[in-house]
């Protein structure tokens, strides 16, 4: 099974216009294998430490932004000082609990999402904020 997964992964990288092997591919594989799907730059730095992928935070940020631009990672809208990356690139919704800094993926139908919002607004009036992000077009892959 790992060979099939690796082949699918390499094909995903190629479709995005990136090499199927090398540092970017290894970084994305490590991120996708992480138990958490939402990672800050500091968390990514710790995650790759000691794996041979270690780079300066600036280089790591550049690599992460390349993966975002190619649609292989998402980036959560955030007012935090450092960006938060999402290893689930497909469009989906999130619940963010500010008190615990927990972000939960919601891959639900529009009807279910509206029901969740209605319930949250009813149960916690004045405590719920809603953010709607309109995604821009993806950028072409950078030249090697």
Image (spheres, rainbow, N blue to C red):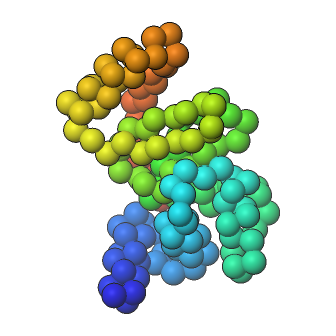
Is residue 13 rendered to the left or right of residue 44?
A: left
Residue 71 or residue 43, whichever sits in front: 43
How far across and how far down the image is residue 85, in percent? 56, 50
In the rendered image, the quadrant that contains the N terminus is: bottom left
Q: Which residue is located at x 49 percent, y 19 percent?
A: 129
Residue 85 or residue 11, whichever sits in front: 85
Q: Which residue is located at x 73 percent, y 64 percent?
A: 46
Where residue 95 sits, quadrant-wise, is top left
In the rendered image, the quadrant that contains the C terminus is: bottom right
Q: Is residue 34 above or below residue 10?
A: above
Q: Which residue is located at x 24 percent, y 33 percent?
A: 112
Is residue 13 rendered to the left or right of residue 83?
A: left
Count of labels in the image: 0
Is residue 7 rendered to the left or right of residue 27?
A: left
> Is residue 70 something that shows in the picture?
no
Is residue 1 rendered to the left or right of residue 37?
A: left
Q: Residue furthest right?
A: 56
């Amino acid at each position: 099974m790992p060979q099939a997964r690796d082949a699918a992964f390499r094909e995903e990288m190629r479709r995005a216009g990136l090499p199927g092997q090398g540092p970017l591919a290894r970084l994305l594989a490590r991120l996708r294998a992480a138990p958490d799907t939402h990672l800050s730059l500091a968390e990514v730095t710790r995650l790759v430490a000691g794996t041979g992928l270690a780079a300066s935070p600036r280089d790591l940020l550049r690599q992460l932004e390349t993966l975002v631009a190619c649609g292989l990672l998402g980036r959560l809208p955030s007012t935090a000082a450092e960006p938060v990356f999402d290893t689930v690139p497909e469009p989906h919704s999130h619940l963010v609990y500010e008190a615990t800094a927990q972000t939960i993926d919601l891959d639900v139908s529009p009807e279910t999402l509206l029901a969740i919002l209605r319930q949250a607004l009813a149960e916690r009036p004045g405590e719920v904020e809603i953010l709607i992000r309109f995604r821009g077009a993806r950028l072409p892959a950078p030249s090697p």
